[in-house]
Amino acid sequence: MRALPGKFETLDKSSVQYVLGHRVALVAKKDGKDWPLNIPPELVGLTYAAMGQKPNQTPPTLKSVTSLPFATTNRRLVTQAGFDEETGIFNIMAIEGVDIPPSTTHADCLQALKTLWEPWADYRWAGDADRAGMLAAIFTTVLRPAMATAPGVFFDAPVQASGKTKAALALGALMTGDHVGVYTFVDGRNQEEEYAKAVIAMMRSERRFWLIDNVTGRFESPVLAGLITSGRVQGRILGMSKDGDFSGRVMLCATGNNATLGSDLSRRFLCCRIDTGVERPSTVSHNFEPSEVAKAKRMAISTAVLTLLNAYWNATPLTLEGGADFHEWSKLVREPITWLQAQGMTEAAGIGNVADPAKALGGTSPSPDQLGLEQLLAGIESVAGCNRAFQVKDLHIWYTLGESGDNDGMALLREGIDNLTGGKEPTSRSLTYVLQNRRDRRSGALRLAHSGIDRNGIIWQVRND
C-alpha cells in the first residue's frame, strides 16, 4: 500500500512495477558502460509477495500523516516511524524513532522548555495570555495530527514589520520540515467561496499547514469556523462539476495588524499579540530567522514537547474548567502548560509568566454587538437599577437625554444603542428589535429579561443573576 492524502491505496502488481521503476535502477555492465534494464516481472512478483498482499485486502483508515513523534489523549507516546493502528496516523519520520526518558527531572523540563522556545525566544509578547498562546501554538503544531480538532493561531501586532509572518512560518517549518507559503487574505463578497476552494484543494493534497497572511479589518468566516470546529468542509472540487465532503487535520494560522476576529473566530483562534516596544520595528535590525531554527531543530522541539507531556502525566493531573470546544487539545496542550506555569517552570526557563492557554482564545477586541450589549445593560443598570421595569419609550427618552453627556449612565446607554444600530437614529420600532433580538443575552452577570406585557407594550428588566 501507499499513503495518499486521507487514505491508503492498495497496490496491484502494475502499481508495484510503477513504484519500483521510479525507485529502483537496474543496470548491466557491458563494454565498461552501464546499460539500464527494465524491471523484470520476476522481481515484481517477488516484491508483491513479500509485501504480503492478500486478495480484496481492505486498507486501514488513514486519519493523518506526520513526520514528528506525537502523543495521544490516553497518555501514550508514539515515537516510532510507521503506521499506528490505534490512532490511524502514519508517521514518515526520517529516523526510526526518538527516546523519551520514563522519568523526568526538574532540570530536564527546564531544558525542554528552552529547546522548544528557541525559534521564538527573541519575540516580545504583549502579555501573559499572548505568551501562553505562543507556547500552546508550539505544542499544538507538534501534536496536531493526533487531535481531531484544535484551535488555529492568530498573530497580531500594533504595527507592520513586527515579525508576525515569520513567527507563523516557523510553525509551518516545525510541522512540515520545509519552508511553507502564505495565502493572501481574501475579503469581500466572494470570500467564503474562495476559502472553500482553498480548503478543498488543501484537503486533496498532502498539505496540512495553512497561513492566511495580512488580515485587515474584521475577520469573520463561517467556512473557517466550521473547519476548525469539525475538521470538515463541503463544496465543489475546483475544475470539476463534483461536490464532496472533505476532512483533514489542518493547522490553521493567520496574521494581521490590529485586525479583529469576529465572535465565531475569536473563540477558535489562539491570539498571540506581538509588541516590539518601538514605534517603527522596520528600523530595528534582527539576525534571527525563526523558520531556519525551527526547521533545523524540529525533532528536538517535538521531543521536548513529549518530554514535558510525560513529566505532567507523572505528576498530579489538573482539573480545569471549560475547554469543551477542544477536549483533546485541553488534555494534550492546555493542561500541561498550565501545570508548567504552576510549577514556576516557564519563568525559570526564561520564557516568562504564562496564563491559562484558554485565555488566549477570544483574546481580540469584542464585536460592536458584544460591546453594545455590555454598554446597554450597564447603562440601564445605572439609570434604572436591576430588576426595575422599563419599556421602549423609556429607553428612547434615556437615549435622547444621553446626548448631553450630563448623566454617565444615559451616555453609556446611548453609546451602546449606537453600537447596536450601526449609529442610525433609533426609532421605537428599531429599539424594539434591539431588545427582542437580545432577550436573555448576558454580559457578565447582567441579563436582559422579558417580564411581561401591558397596553403600552413589552415590559423589560435588567437582572443580575
Image: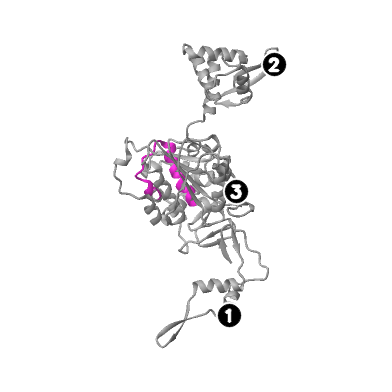
The relative height of residue 56 versus residue 388 in the rendered view (above or below) is below
Badge 3 or badge 1: first in the primary sequence: 1
Above or below, comparing residue 48 to residue 148 in the picture = below
The amino acid type, in three-letter code, at marker 2 is Ile
Q: Quadrant of residue 125?
A: top left
Q: Earlier in the sequence, mark 2 or mark 1?
A: 1
SS type, badge 3: strand
Identity, as a three-letter code, of the amino acid under mark 3: Arg
Disc number at residue 232? Answer: 3
Q: Which residue is mark 2?
A: 453
Image location (x, y in percent) of residue 114: 37, 48
* The residue stretch that appears in magenta: 116-142
Tell me if I can see residue 326 in this picture.
Answer: no
Cβ atoms at labels 2 and 3 below 8 Å apart: no
Task: Inspect the image, locate mark 1, and give the three-letter code of the amino acid beneath it.
Answer: Pro
Q: Which residue is denoted by mark 1 in the rendering? A: 41
Viewer-nearest residue: 105 or 274: 274
